[in-house]
């Protein structure tokens, strides 16, 4: 267990505009306190007090006098619990009646306190009260009546604000499942009264009475029955009758939803449009028992409530609508598993209705549902082609993935924080998903996928795990190695290049691996995905259930392959064929590697260049391809590219000839001596890992020395001059990006995307100067070095240049690939955008589309990234919170991108006199709907993987025009 963790918290800069900061959390101290609270009769509480309306606090037997108004009685927190909240924003044992409504909503910290309340309620349910294992029986610590009254006031305040409901519909609706607010009724009052009478007559029942009064839940019914059995010999006949009566009352209290009583506690809805819809539902289906009818009709009403709730302006009426929607969700959840479709048509109908229900429950945004609704409403047809059925399944599978991603986006951060000191917290997200309609939607989509696999022969063969249709290939390739299944945070895992990893999400700075599969794929054009595609690393997406199923094979040697069509094979080593074994016959160390061209490099150019003076022809000669290609774009699109400076290779090389501090050799000689020694070690057959360890140690020394390297005076003088002349402002008065730009990037067979350092929005003069040295040192980091060593023949010949450009505080940014990665059509486009700067390239959950060359587009994934970067004028970055109720990209943006892509395809080859005919990878952004270009490079795919005879052999030939009758048995 680590001694401390980092918790990210939000500092508000206006409404929902947040800055994340870091604060260390004393994990071991919290672990010790949690263990102590579990065995403490008072749990996290110190004592009981009366809290009077005049602000006074009185002893438990000294209630607030009538002359100062009523008060509430509840516990006070232990001092260290209070301190934990103040210092680290972790709140244990929260009592609602002791909390301000705005404090629980916690907008400044991205609603953390509300989410912590929900998470703690889950922990209590799975761990016998968790920190209240004994404290849950601490009489008077929590009063259910006060908590319910507080809950009603909370929602009255919260639901009065349209912007909260628009931007946080899912979170608000989920919170209704945890925050008491339903008010008292006869059954609840009767249950409490009966338990009081029993405890008054039979003292051992007191703990259960306190539990029923304070935090009643279904498991209490079982506890009461067990109590009666345990104490049977001690109970009088009268007490037995009273306990029987309590059990009967509790059974009514916890029984399933009665459709006819949906409006029983929703008097404010009578006569309203939605109220009338609910009344019609009750009248038409109050006695309905067919699951298919109940699911389809309840789903439509559930979606209708979401679509119309903002038209109802009264907060308490909105609360009643949300409560009705929760009851409708319960009806759907309980009946969906009873609905057993017999035909494909029935299966398609079920998926459509469950998709609309998931939207009504907030798992999908309304605009997202509008993108797939038409496709999922095609069950009226008599038949569909395999292509049409596949598209249906892909979009439905998207709805499942988006639903799960909505839960993770809202709760992953707080789950990760609590998980460091309470591992049971990691089950919270899975519990939320499994308790939702998305569970049945996923199951139904999986069944459709199995049917399509049988019809098309495009099947996965992944060991013997269930639900294999939820796996899909992303990048073709094959690998052999140890299978490593990582269910927790990937950032703590030290990966190696000979293993195959299954992650919840890929690490942000992934080092070389043999193969990878992820639950949250991020997006298909992130640097990690591009590297995998470029290098032929097999890559797939899978479900949470798939990951859990694969755990049993963790640590075993497996063969892993993904075909160009996306079907997947994973098998144990013992089951490999001779053909598969032959793929991994040991080759010479240089086989399949790429050589960096250095014949034309010009190291004599040691003056800073104006971006306007370079173009694509200078790539690999004066500077790297980022600067050269951006200079080319500046010539072609002068109003879409900022001004810039280029620090060429020669400046770096000139500085490296200086003597290293404390050594009798230059930086450059030190570097070359290290490579020479490594070659000697290889010649002496010293193990590769030992050679690598030596090299990494020497590179660490070199990086540290470069960080202290003195910058030459003539260079500093020119930098000062060129900032004013080219960028228009003095050095230190305009924020800039410093982008590493090496000669090992964007080669014909190696992209190198994201391997070296980019510094965002640097303003301070000293930070810019130190940043230049940091960028020069970045090719010698462990991650960058390992990728180069694995794929390059002459990694010692890497030279960094630096592109210096003014910051553009874009509203959203991302990547354009001038081919349809998902559609397979070279004439289509793929785009992925995230809010703020640096979007999509770092694996964010980005809004991704295929733009079709013949018109129209398809949403492949919405964004589920909770934070994004803004670039303030005073330098640095701020993190702000995102909501998902609106799409990022608009029609004008898509049109601009289509026009840009057309010009790039036709003009770049002519302007650069290049014979390159492949796709391009373009980084761009929008500020106030104006398009800005930041980078262009070839989109490099692994030709070996695409042309592999083996991968071709496992790719079935599918007749996509095959007609499938929808009356066919599923």
Image (spheres, rainbow, N blue to C red):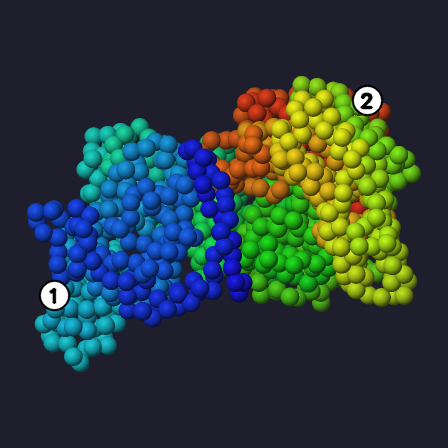
Q: Is residue 699 left or right of residue 271?
A: right
Estimate how packed mark 2 is, as few (under 14), some (14 to 19) or many (20 or more) residues with alpha carbons within 10 Å. few
Q: Secondary structure at mark 2?
A: helix
x and y percentages locating residue 812 in the rendered image: 56, 31
x and y percentages locating residue 631 in the rendered image: 76, 26
Towards the viewer: 145 or 545: 145
Query: In percent of the image, x 22 and y 68: which residue is there?
Result: 207
Count of numbered labels shown in the rendering: 2
x and y percentages locating residue 857 in the rendered image: 58, 28
x and y percentages locating residue 496 in the rendered image: 70, 58
* Corner quadrant of residue 43: bottom left
Residue carrying label 2: 910
Extreme-bottom residue of the structure: 233
Q: Secondary structure at mark 1?
A: helix
Q: Is residue 658 above or below residue 85?
A: above
Q: Is residue 794 left or right of residue 50?
A: right
First reached walking from the N terminus: tag 2 or tag 1 = 1
Q: Are marks 2 and 1 in contact (CB under 8 Å)?
A: no
Residue 365 at least partly seen:
no
Q: Is residue 620 left or right of residue 395?
A: right
Estimate the spatial distance between the alpha carbons at disc 2 and disc 1, rounded to whole Å.
91 Å
Residue carrying label 1: 197
Q: Is residue 131 above or below residue 531?
A: below
Query: In percent of the image, x 52 and y 39: which residue is there?
Result: 879
């Amino acid at each position: 267990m680590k001694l401390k963790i980092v918790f990210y918290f939000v500092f508000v800069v206006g409404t929902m505009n947040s800055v994340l900061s870091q604060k260390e959390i004393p994990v071991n101290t919290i672990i010790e306190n949690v263990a102590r609270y579990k065995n403490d009769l008072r749990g996290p509480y110190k004592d009981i007090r009366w809290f009077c309306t005049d602000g006074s606090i009185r002893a438990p037997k000294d209630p607030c006098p009538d002359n100062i108004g009523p008060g509430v009685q509840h516990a006070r927190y232990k001092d260290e619990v209070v301190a934990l909240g103040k210092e680290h924003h972790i709140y244990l044992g929260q009592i609602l009646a002791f909390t301000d409504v705005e404090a629980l909503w916690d907008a400044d910290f991205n609603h953390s306190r509300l989410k912590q309340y929900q998470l703690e309620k889950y922990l209590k349910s799975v761990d016998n009260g968790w920190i209240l294992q004994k404290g849950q029986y601490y009489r008077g610590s929590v009063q259910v009546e006060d908590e319910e009254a507080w809950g009603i006031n909370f929602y009255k305040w919260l639901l009065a604000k349209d912007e909260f409901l628009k931007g946080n519909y899912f979170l608000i609706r989920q919170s209704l499942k945890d925050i008491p607010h339903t008010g008292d009724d006869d059954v609840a009052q009767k249950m409490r009264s009966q338990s009081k009478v029993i405890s008054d007559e039979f003292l051992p029942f007191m703990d259960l009475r306190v539990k029923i009064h304070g935090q009643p839940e279904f498991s209490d019914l079982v506890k009461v029955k067990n109590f009666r059995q345990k104490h049977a010999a001690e109970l009088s006949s009268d007490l037995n009758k009273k306990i029987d009566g309590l059990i009967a009352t509790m059974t009514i209290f916890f029984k399933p939803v009665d459709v006819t009583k949906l409006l029983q506690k929703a008097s404010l809805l009578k006569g309203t449009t939605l109220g009338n819809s609910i009344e019609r539902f009750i009248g038409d289906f109050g006695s309905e028992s067919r699951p298919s009818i109940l699911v389809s009709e309840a789903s439509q009403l559930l979606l209708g409530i979401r679509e119309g709730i903002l038209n109802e302006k009264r907060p308490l009426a909105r609360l009643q609508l949300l409560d009705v929607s929760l009851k409708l969700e319960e009806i759907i959840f309980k009946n969906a598993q009873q609905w057993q479709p017999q035909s494909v048509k029935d299966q398609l109908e079920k998926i459509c209705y469950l998709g609309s229900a998931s939207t009504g429950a907030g798992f999908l945004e309304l605009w997202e549902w509008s993108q797939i609704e038409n496709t999922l409403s095609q069950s009226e047809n008599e038949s569909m082609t395999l292509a049409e059925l596949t598209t249906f399944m892909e979009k439905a599978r998207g709805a499942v993935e988006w639903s799960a991603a909505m839960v993770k986006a809202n709760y992953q951060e707080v789950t990760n924080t609590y998980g460091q000191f309470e591992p049971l917290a990691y089950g919270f997200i899975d519990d939320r998903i499994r308790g939702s309609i998305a569970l049945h939607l996923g199951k139904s989509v999986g069944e459709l996928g199995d049917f399509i696999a049988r019809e098309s022969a495009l099947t996965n063969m992944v060991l013997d795990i269930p639900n294999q249709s939820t796996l899909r290939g992303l990048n073709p390739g094959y690998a052999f190695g140890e299978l490593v299944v990582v269910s927790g945070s990937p950032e703590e895992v030290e990966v190696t290049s000979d293993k195959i990893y299954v992650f919840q999400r890929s690490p942000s700075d992934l080092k070389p691996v043999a193969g990878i599969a992820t639950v949250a794929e991020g997006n298909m054009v992130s640097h990690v995905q591009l590297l995998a595609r470029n290098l032929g690393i097999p890559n797939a997406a899978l479900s949470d259930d798939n990951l859990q199923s694969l755990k049993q094979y963790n640590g075993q040697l497996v063969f892993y392959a993904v075909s160009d069509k996306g079907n997947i094979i994973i098998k144990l080593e013992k089951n490999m064929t001779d053909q598969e074994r032959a793929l991994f016959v040991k080759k010479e160390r240089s086989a399949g590697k790429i050589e960096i061209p250095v014949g034309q490099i010009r190291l004599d150019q040691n003056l800073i260049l104006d971006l306007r003076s370079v173009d694509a022809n200078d790539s690999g000669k004066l500077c790297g391809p980022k600067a050269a290609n951006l200079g080319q774009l500046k010539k072609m699109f002068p109003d879409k590219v900022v001004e810039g400076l280029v620090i060429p290779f020669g400046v770096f090389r000139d500085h490296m000839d200086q003597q290293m501090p404390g050594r009798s050799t230059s930086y450059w000689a030190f570097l070359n001596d290290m490579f020479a020694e490594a070659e000697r070690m290889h010649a002496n057959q010293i193990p590769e890992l030992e050679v690598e360890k030596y090299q990494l140690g020497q590179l660490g020394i070199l990086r540290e020395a470069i960080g202290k390297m003195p910058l030459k005076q003539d260079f500093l003088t020119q930098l000062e001059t060129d900032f004013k002349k080219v960028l228009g402002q003095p050095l230190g008065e305009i924020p800039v990006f410093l982008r590493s730009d090496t000669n090992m990037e964007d080669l014909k067979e190696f992209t190198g995307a994201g391997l070296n350092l980019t510094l965002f929005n640097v303003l301070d003069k000293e930070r810019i100067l130190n940043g230049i040295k940091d960028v020069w040192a970045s090719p010698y980091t462990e991650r960058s070095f390992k990728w180069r060593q694995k794929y390059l023949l002459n990694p010692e010949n890497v030279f960094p240049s630096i592109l210096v450009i003014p910051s553009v505080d874009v509203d959203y940014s991302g990547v354009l690939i001038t081919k349809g990665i998902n559609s397979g059509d070279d004439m289509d486009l793929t785009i992925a955008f995230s809010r703020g700067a640096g979007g999509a390239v770092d694996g964010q959950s980005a809004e991704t589309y295929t733009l079709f060359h013949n018109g129209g587009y398809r949403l492949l994934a919405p964004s589920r990234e909770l934070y994004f970067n803004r670039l303030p004028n005073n330098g640095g970055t701020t993190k702000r919170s995102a909501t998902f109720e609106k799409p990022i990209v608009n029609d004008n943006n898509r049109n601009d991108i289509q026009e840009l892509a057309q010009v790039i395809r036709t003009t770049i080859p002519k302007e650069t006199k290049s014979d390159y005919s492949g796709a391009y990878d373009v980084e761009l952004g929008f500020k106030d709907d104006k398009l800005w270009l930041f980078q262009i490079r070839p989109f490099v795919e692994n030709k070996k993987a695409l042309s592999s005879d083996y991968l071709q052999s496992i790719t079935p030939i599918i007749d996509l025009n095959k007609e499938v009758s929808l009356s066919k048995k599923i």
